[in-house]
Amino acid sequence: MAQLATEPVTLKTPGGELEGDLVIPDQATSIVLFAHGSGSSRRSPRNRAVAEALRTAGYGTLLMDLLTRDEAAFDQQTQQLRFDVDLLAERLVPAVDALGDWPSTRGRYVGLFGASTGAAAALKAAARRPDRVGALVSRGGRPDLGGDALASVEAPTLLIVGGNDREVLNLNRQAAGLMTSLPLADVSIEIVPGAGHLFEEPGALEHVSASAAAWLRHYLGAAPNASEGGHFKPPEPRRRPPTS
């Protein structure tokens, strides 16, 4: 796959400007917005690896910092803001809205990919933008931190958890049971055998990427000539049209 150009983007919020990296393959019909976990950023090596795999599968990606530069510097010392799921969700919602406004992304389907506490923020954002978010994937996430918003999520959700991450797996199972606005088939937990919380084991992150791509392909569709493959093998795509 040829090297794709990265478009630096900025998002203005009441708290300040957020920085992001937007990459859109030719013929991509969907954009996946990443919500990183606690203590991380748009430069997360694991999220960037998944993003690269999703671009190979034909999806555009947007990796955003959810804290401003000043907030990130403050958080490095206090470790307070990284666990503020409501704040992170408040940053994701305008990012979702921006994808519907920017000329390069307008009219494309939107998916969310959340890791750790970012998964809870993604679920909260999806609950607030049901007409814009068509699918959601969580990697080693804490969806239980989504609270009351879980019952309002309408975006089909795949929760990917390491088989050795037993406490988080239990929390994901509890959270899935609270997502009552979705049919049972639209909430799924996938266990990666032998993987821990960070999916550092050989092949674990590749498993995550393939399963995420397959889930998104089912609910958002795929770009023409996109590569196939994946562990999750659902039936035909069911698209959720973007709204203007």
Image (cartoon, helix red, strand yellow):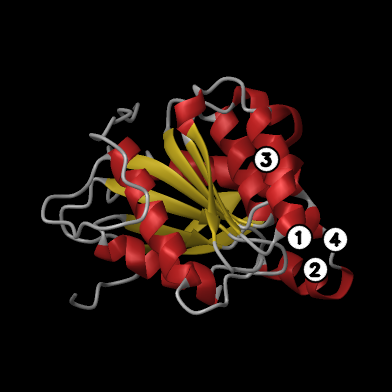
Q: Can you give x and y, in whole percent of width and height, for residue 6 in the image?
A: 33, 71
Kindly identify the amino acid type of the residue bearing the numbered disc 1.
Answer: Arg
Residue at the limit of the structure toward the front, as seen here: 193
Residue labelled with disc 4: 80
Q: CA distance from mark 4 to mark 2?
A: 6 Å
Q: Secondary structure at mark 4?
A: loop
Q: CA distance from mark 2 to mark 1?
A: 7 Å
Kindly identify the amino acid type of the residue bearing the numbered disc 2.
Answer: Asp
Marks 2 and 1 in Cβ contact (< 8 Å): yes
Q: CA distance from mark 2 to mark 3?
A: 30 Å
Q: Earlier in the sequence, mark 3 or mark 4?
A: 4
Residue labelled with disc 1: 82
Marks 1 and 4 in Cβ contact (< 8 Å): yes
In the picture, measured across the screen, residue 55 lies left or right of residue 147, that is left
Residue at the limit of the structure toward the left, as seen here: 225
Kindly identify the amino acid type of the residue bearing the numbered disc 3.
Answer: Arg
Residue labelled with disc 2: 75
Q: Can you give x and y, in whole percent of width and height, for residue 220 in the image?
A: 31, 39
Q: Secondary structure at mark 3?
A: helix
